Each structure stands twice: as structure tokens, then as C-alpha cells.
Amino acid sequence: MSYEKVAQHKARTIIGTKQTLKAMRNGEISELFIANDADQQIIGKVIELANSLNIPCSHVDSMKKLGAACGIEVGASTVALKQK
């Protein structure tokens, strides 16, 4: 389900940890997707900030599949959806 949701909303996606953190701090994010196979040190900051800002997080199995759902050829550790 989560991969499909990301694929359906490609125009609203923010891909990658650095961009996601910046957008979350700016209050631009409505939902977050995190790959379970990503480096825990990297995604730890994202999860912590999402929890403090009460941003809903969905976990997916694969960075590669998450990247593919966004239309990129590399894996993505985090993908965020911008608010409408």
C-alpha cells in the first residue's frame, strides 16, 4: 500500500533524508515513509523529528522499492509527502 501511495503522489514527494528534515522543520510535510533496510543512524534523526512533530510515519521494506516508487533508479531511505 505505501509504495502505491508514494507512486500516486510523485509530484508531492520529497526524496532523501536531508531534504526531508528541512521540509519537516518548515512544516511542509503531511506524511513520511521510511525504508526498514536504511542505515538506522541516518533515519534515526528523521524518526525522532517526525515523532516530535506528530507526523505520521509508515515503514516499508526496501529502499530500492521506495526509490522506484518515486521514479528514481537508486534507493531512497526516506520519502516525505508535502501537504496539499
Image (spheres, helix red, strand yellow):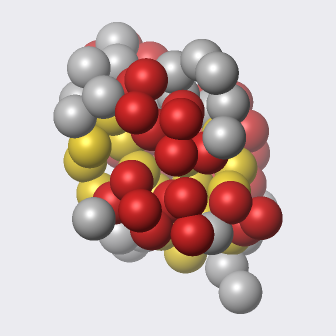
In-image side of 79 versus 82 (left or right): left
Q: Which residue is drawn at 51% across and 59% down?
A: 6
Decide which of 54, 73 is in the foreground and name it.
Answer: 73
The x, y position of residue 57, in whole percent, is 33, 59
Q: Which residue is drawn at 64% across and 21% down?
A: 73
Evaluate whether residue 34 shows in this view.
yes
The x, y position of residue 81, in whole percent, is 60, 64
Q: How many marks?
A: 0
Instruction: Tell me which corner region of the image, top left, top right, bottom left or bottom right, holds residue 61.
Output: top left
The x, y position of residue 34, in whole percent, is 37, 41
Q: Could you tell me which quadrant the C terminus lies in?
A: bottom right
The x, y position of residue 25, in whole percent, is 68, 55
Q: Which residue is drawn at 26% across and 20% down?
A: 37
Q: Residue at x 39, y 54 (%)?
A: 3
Residue 33, placed above or below residue 12: above
Extreme-bottom residue of the structure: 84
Instruction: Tell me which corner region of the image, top left, top right, bottom left or bottom right, holds residue 18.
Output: top right
Residue 48, placed above or below residue 61: below
Instruction: Tell me which corner region of the image, top left, top right, bottom left or bottom right, holds residue 1.
Output: bottom left
In-image side of 35 versus 14 (left or right): left
Evaluate whether residue 20 shows in this view.
no
Residue 79, placed above or below residue 43: below
In-image side of 62 versus 12 (left or right): left
Decide which of 63, 18 is in the foreground and name it.
Answer: 63
